Amino acid sequence: MSARRRLGGPWRRHRPLRTRLALAASAAVALVAVGISAGAFLVIRYELYHQLDLNLTQSATLVTQQNRDEGPGIVAGECRFLSAPACAQIVPADPADDPARPYLLPVSAPVREVAADERAPYFTNVELFGRPARMLTTDFGEGRALQVALRADTVEKGVRQAAWLLAGASGAGVLLAAGLGYWVSRTGLAPVARLTATAERIAATRDPRHRIELPAGPPGREDEVTRLGAAFNTMLGELEQSVAAQRRLVADASHELRTPLTALRTNAELLARADRLTEAQRERASGALARQLREVTGMVNDLIELARDEEPHPLLEEVRLAPLVEHCVEAARAHWPGTEFTLYVEDAAARLAFPGVPSRLSRLLTNLLDNAAKFSPAGTAVEVALTTGELTVRDHGAGIAEEDLPYVFDRFYRAESARALPGSGLGLAMARQIARAHGAELAAEGAQGGGALFRLTLPPETDTSAAG
Ligand SMILES: Nc1ncnc2c1ncn2[C@@H]1O[C@H](COP(=O)(O)OP(=O)(O)O)[C@@H](O)[C@H]1O
Ligand SMILES: [Mg+2]
């Protein structure tokens, strides 16, 4: 791993989003501020020197006019003082032609080249009497160069001042940018911080009753963070509901299991002292034990199914209803030989199909068929009918009493008259749950002429023309 990755990792990971955003925003603004300042500085410096260079050019013209015929040497030497005119000297191309007196301005190889016409005129910054100066070296004709210099103190000072000013301004800009960036990310991310705090509180307390406070605003015009918060709240609501449902199920289940378990234990304890029982007592106790065990097993199995159904089913497929109903009725006939099952499928309903989970739908129907067989006297018929809109199961038993009707779909509810028969009271709860998960509705009513009638209203989008 490279050193850069190692440095980059913690930088990204350990800084809060707020700081990272603030840093990014202020870095961007700072970059712009520094860039503009640097640009301004270059322009100002160019302008100041340009002005000085124009003055130098003018001076050079003047000196040329006045000293056309002068030989090599100093022609004007007053530039020692700040506001004095330019100082000037003439330099020959050949150092052999130099005058005896030393030059005032520095003479280098390029100056000789200008004199020899081998180089274009040029400007340089030089030092004169320990002071900054600007010098123009230009052609003077006849193998000579003219050097003109002016004090550049004011220009240098101006440039320095500009540099300080701009540096100060961009420094302040950077600071301001950092402050603003921090403020913007703070206020901008405040809702995210609230969301995070709520999520952390829920994670710590495992209590999904918390909600995120959302700013009141016109609906439909919320920002992304508010929408995220709203979605989070919706999710929490669903989580709360499902947690509550699970808790209720567990509470109901443990309550309902207590009685049969106590009976089981009593019988088991009784059998443990089998030596003191008569043959008949022993037989009764072991028979009861076996029955109770079966009951508890059945109830636990139903409970597991009921709880499992809360999970989402990803395995939806196009279910053709008629064959499924036929199959279930066939199975019920085998299971309840004393009961006659009749099946009527309307022609138009023969091709009914809708998306669902076949095993769950079979379970729904089986529960209804089992109830019908269980709660009606032997030899009577159970009538199953499938039409385009609904599936009905009707029996000729005692039916459901008016006062029980509202409760038969409740978990563990069993009518007074049903308690002698085996069952857990979970069958109809499961059936209704499966129906609703498929967008259908299951209802119970008293059938005309006696008996119970269960009506499964199919979802309206059911397809009546399934192929195949
Ligand atoms: N076909 C029916 N005829 C009369 N009563 C019924 C019928 N189906 C259900 N019930 C009543 O509804 C109650 C709940 O049914 P269910 O949830 O299947 O429990 P279980 O079958 O285990 O008793 C039954 O105990 C019974 O009182
Ligand atoms: Mg049942």
Image: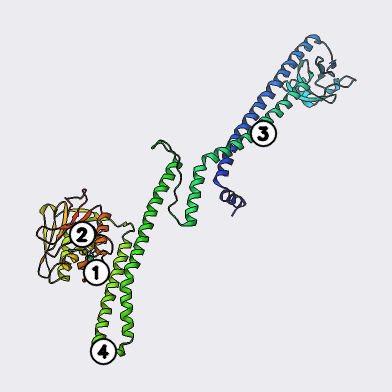
Q: Is residue 245 left or right of residue 113?
A: left
Q: Position of residue 165 (x, y in %)?
A: 70, 28
Which picture quadrant has residue 167?
A: top right
- The residue wearing badge 3 is 171
Between circles 1 and 3, the one closer to the viewer is: 1
Seen as rendered, the residue at the extreme right is: 100
Q: Does label 2 point to a residue whose CB lies under 8 Å from ligand 1? A: no
Query: Cβ–Cβ below 8 Å for labels 4 and 1?
Result: no
Question: 10 Å neighbourhood of mark 2: few (<14), some, or many (≥20)?
Answer: few
Mark found first going from the N terminus, 2 or 4: 4
**Left or right of 206 on screen, residue 246:** left
Mark 1 or mark 3: which comes first in sequence? 3
Residue behind mark 2 = 403
Is 385 rendered above or below residue 138? below
Q: Quadrant of residue 161?
A: top right
Between the C-alphas of marks 4 and 1, the distance is 30 Å
Number of numbered callouts drawn: 4
> Which residue in the structure is indicated by mark 4?
278
Disc 1 Cβ-to-ligand 1 distance below 8 Å: yes
- Near mark 4 (Cα within 10 A), the count class, few <14, some 14-19 or many ≥20, is few
Upstream in sequence: badge 4 or badge 1: 4
> Is tag 3's residue or tag 2's residue first in the polypeptide sequence?
3
Query: Could you tell me the amino acid type at mark 1?
Result: Gly
324 or 257: nearer the viewer = 257
Amino acid type at mark 2:
Glu
Amino acid at dot 4: Thr
Q: Position of residue 181 (x, y in %)?
A: 58, 38
Circle 1 sits on which residue?
A: 423
Answer above or below: position of 94 versus 282.
above
